[in-house]
Amino acid sequence: MSRFGLIAFISLWVSAASLSGQTTSASPSPAATAKKEKKKEKQPADNTNPLLGGVKGAPTNGPVTTEIYADDAFFDSNKNVGIFSGHVKVADPRFTLQSEKLTVYVTKGENQGLEKAIAEGNVAVVRDRPDPNGGAPTRAVGRSDQATYIASTGNVELRGTPRVQEGVNTHIATSPDTVMVVNQNGQLTTHGPSRTEIRQEPKTEEQKNETKPTPSSKPPGTS
């Protein structure tokens, strides 16, 4: 049977207040609405997710849209569960993900939103950590057998001999039971045995010459 290449989009419009557990306030005044419009104009135009090569995510301080691409999809509206399989790719403003299978759980009630997502099989997760000095963000790439994203905390839990690479440095689990957690700021916490590889590039000739002391022009024995 030929693959029919299903592309499934799930738009989860969740306000910033609901994501932080706060209740929604009354309708804003026209002046407040005008201020919000000005803030939106200051947002960068391009929010491209690098892992997916051109798929754009929503700004993190506005409505959140999660897009899921897969070959096949199954939805159970009674349980609020969606199961995606085959070349799964997820585009979210907070992270990007690839896996063989993805199970998505949506909260019940009027304000529906993403509760959690469990990825399985050759999982790769990319999350950028902002630079406090305003420079380029540091990218963390996590790989594992399983990854669980918890929407309430923004954490991504990696299980099944996980490993996380940040720049040229790599953090590797030495036990299949080790769990690595990457939070929404890109910070890594490891529970269980692990090994860290810190890579240092050899100095170039130019760098070596810069560290050499400048020879003195005075003859020996003179002060």
Image (cartoon, grey):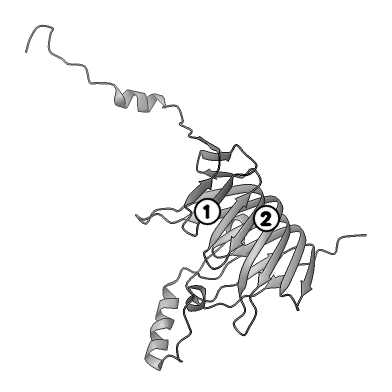
Q: Between residues 90 and 223, which one lies in front from this camera angle?
A: 90
Secondary structure of the residue carrying tag 1 is: strand
Tell me where residue 5 appears, x and y as whole percent. 81, 63
Q: Residue at x 64, y 55 (%)?
A: 147
Residue 130 vertical position relative to residue 210 in the rendered view, above or below = below
Classify residue 143 as left or right of residue 214.
right
Classify residue 42 as left or right of residue 127.
left
Which residue position holds label 2?
98
Q: Amino acid at mark 1?
A: Val
Tell me where residue 163 appears, x and y as whole percent. 59, 43
Which residue position holds label 1?
182
Q: Earlier in the sequence, mark 2 or mark 1?
A: 2
Marks 2 and 1 sit apart, C-alpha to C-alpha, by 16 Å
Residue 168 vertical position relative to residue 152 in the rendered view, above or below = above
Label 2 Cα crowd, 10 Å radius (few <14 / some 14-19 / many 20+): many
2 or 1: mark nearer the eye: 1
Tell me where residue 149 appears, x and y as whole percent. 60, 61
